[in-house]
Image (cartoon, rainbow, N blue to C red):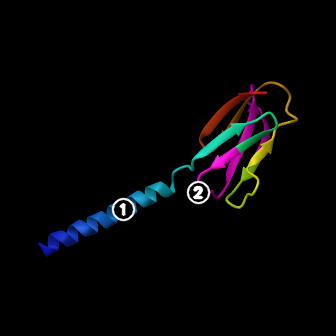
Amino acid sequence: MKTSFIIIVALSFFTSLSLSATNLHQEPYIKVVVTPQRILLITDETPIATMLVEVKNAEGKVVLEKLFSSKSTDWSMCIANLPAGTYSVTAGDKVTRFVR
């Protein structure tokens, strides 16, 4: 009985370690909000070492990019000077399209 309990506790412990390690490698949640003047990035509390955010035009050419990290204080990009057109924002594994 005591041995069974120890085995169950040990399995439970290693399973929780495995799940925690898996969660460490997931992309953080990012919400992209586009206004006429700025792109705002809203993240969860997951620390981000670095994240490159790119804005591409309809032809796929990078027209604006910025590197963000957990130490960044301004999580936005100014798009006021972009000409009218269709664009996409790539932030991590999230792609958001917008028309300006």
Q: Which residue lies furthest to the front in this view?
A: 35
Question: At which x and y percent is residue 69?
Answer: 69, 57
Q: Is mark 1 on a helix, strand or loop?
A: helix
Q: Residue furthest bottom?
A: 2
Residue 52 located left or right of residue 63: left
Image height check: is 23 above or below 2? above
Q: Name the residue under label 2.
A: 45
Nearer the observer, 20 or 40: 40
Q: Distance between the residues labelled 2 and 1?
A: 20 Å
Numbered disc total: 2
Question: At which x and y percent is residue 78?
Answer: 82, 42
Amino acid of disc 1: Ser
Q: Which residue is drawn at 63% across and 42% down?
A: 31
The circle on residue 16 is 1
Q: What stretch is highlighted in magenta?
A: 41-65
Specify few, some or many for label 2: CA neighbours under 10 Å numbering under 14, 14-19, or 20 or more: few
Quadrant showing the N terminus: bottom left
Q: Is residue 36 part of the magenta span, yes or no?
A: no
Q: Is mark 2 on a helix, strand or loop?
A: loop
Specify few, some or many for label 1: CA neighbours under 10 Å numbering under 14, 14-19, or 20 or more: few
Figure quadrant of residue 79:
top right
